[in-house]
Image (tube, rainbow, N blue to C red):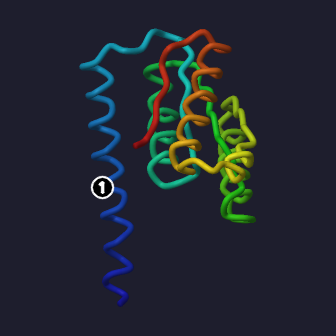
Amino acid sequence: MLGVQAVEPMATQKNKSDLMRQARLDFLRQPWWQKNEPIVLGVSGGLDSMALLEIIFRLNSEFPVKIVVGHVNYHLRGEESNQAATHVQKTCKKMGILYKEMDGSDVRNTEDNLQNVARELRKDFFRQLSGQNQTRKIFLAH
């Protein structure tokens, strides 16, 4: 077991380095950004969206943009939902990134497909944030 513990962090670090290198190359190849342009990141608190947040944050010194994070708390998983929101908020504060949260608890009252209603609510919120920040760039980790 000791051997596995010693190898895992190195593999994780190598994967992170490879991911950052690939993301940097993608930024260079796809000139989608303009210096100090606002972008909206949809961050749920899950691994994918937290990785996206970290990648954009790390690349921000070389490719400066104004990052705005949007999070929708549906309160569907009780305290776990609140913990995810708090985690995203604290991470943004630590990084000096603007954080905006929407209370999406109304989706619980829907008689339609919950996933579809939640998706539409989320999309509307991200569009609203992009309008408020005068950008058309919304990034999601899906």
Residue in view at x 31 percent, y 84 percent: 3
Q: Where is residue 21 in the image (x, y as percent from the top left)?
A: 29, 38
In the current view of this chain or complex, which residue is farthest to the bottom? 1
Of 113 and 14, which appears nearest the observer? 113
> Which residue is found at the position 33% from the left and 47% from the top?
17
Classify 10 Å Cα crowding around label 1: few (below 14), some (14-19), many (20 and above): few
Q: Quadrant of the C terminus?
A: top left
What residue did someone put label 1 on? 14
Q: Measured along the vertical axis of the image, is residue 30 above or below residue 7? A: above
132, 10: nearer the viewer: 132
User: Can you say whether 42 is above or below 60 in the image?
Assistant: below
Q: In which quarter of the image is the N terminus?
A: bottom left
Question: What is the count of numbered marks?
Answer: 1
Image vertical order of residue 30 relative to residue 87, above or below: above
Does 22 sit left or right of 91 as displayed? left
Answer above or below: position of 63 versus 55. above
From the viewer's perspective, is 101 left or right of 31?
A: right
Q: Which amino acid does label 1 sit on?
A: Lys
Q: Give how far across and how far down residue 28 sits, in percent.
A: 29, 20
Secondary structure beneath dot 1 equals helix
Which of the two residues, 40 or 104, is positioned nearer the viewer here? 104
Q: Which of 111 and 73 is in front in this view?
A: 111
Residue at image x 50%, y 42%? 54
Q: Position of residue 25 (x, y in %)?
A: 26, 28
Percent x, y of residue 129: 64, 22
In which quarter of the view is residue 75 placed? bottom right
